[in-house]
Image (cartoon, rainbow, N blue to C red):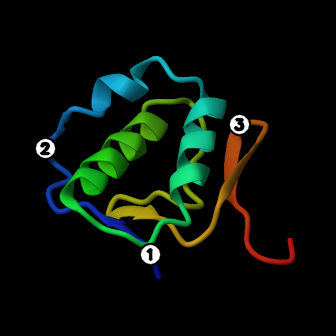
Amino acid sequence: MGGIRIVDSEQEYENEYTARFADDSIEELVQTFNSDQPSQGWVSARGRFLAALRQAFLDTEIDCSSFISEEGMSLDYPIRLEGNIIFQVKENQ
């Protein structure tokens, strides 16, 4: 199971990617997630990128509970927006 795990959820953390997502639409955030989701590589910069992307999703009015929890964000499947809810797109759906 792929994903990021938030170590200190009490602390709001900004990094060099936070501003990049600040003005993105929800559609742009979904596209960014889906572009990165298949990647298997891991470096600290990707961790910061995904943490900022997770926070950008949480800052919207959209229900992201299918792939984001207090503990982190699942990268197991691509996502899609339907109304005000984001769903993970699992195989054969």
Residue 2: quadrant of the picture: bottom left
In the displayed orientation, state which residue is furthest to the bottom.
Answer: 1
Percent position of residue 77, x then y: 62, 68
Q: Earlier in the sequence, mark 2 or mark 1?
A: 1
Q: Residue 51, relative to residue 60: is it above or below?
A: below
Percent position of residue 82, x then y: 79, 43
Question: Which element is circle 1 on?
Answer: loop
For the point 13% across and 44% down, which residue is it? 11
Looking at the image, which is closer to me, 68 or 20? Answer: 20
Q: Calculate the distance from the C-alpha at mark 1 to the C-alpha at mark 3.
A: 24 Å
Q: Residue 54, relative to residue 74: is it above or below?
A: above
Looking at the image, which is closer to me, 42 or 73? Answer: 42
For the point 37% across and 25% down, which residue is it? 20
- Location of mark 3 (residue): 84
Percent position of residue 93, x then y: 86, 71
Crowd band around label 3 with a 10 angstrom C-alpha radius: few (<14), some (14–19), many (20+): few
- Location of mark 1 (residue): 2
Q: Is residue 63 left or right of residue 85?
A: left
Q: Earlier in the sequence, mark 3 or mark 2?
A: 2
Q: Calculate the distance from the C-alpha at mark 2 to the C-alpha at mark 1.
A: 23 Å
| Label 3 with label 2: CB-CB less than 8 Å | no
- Location of mark 2 (residue): 11
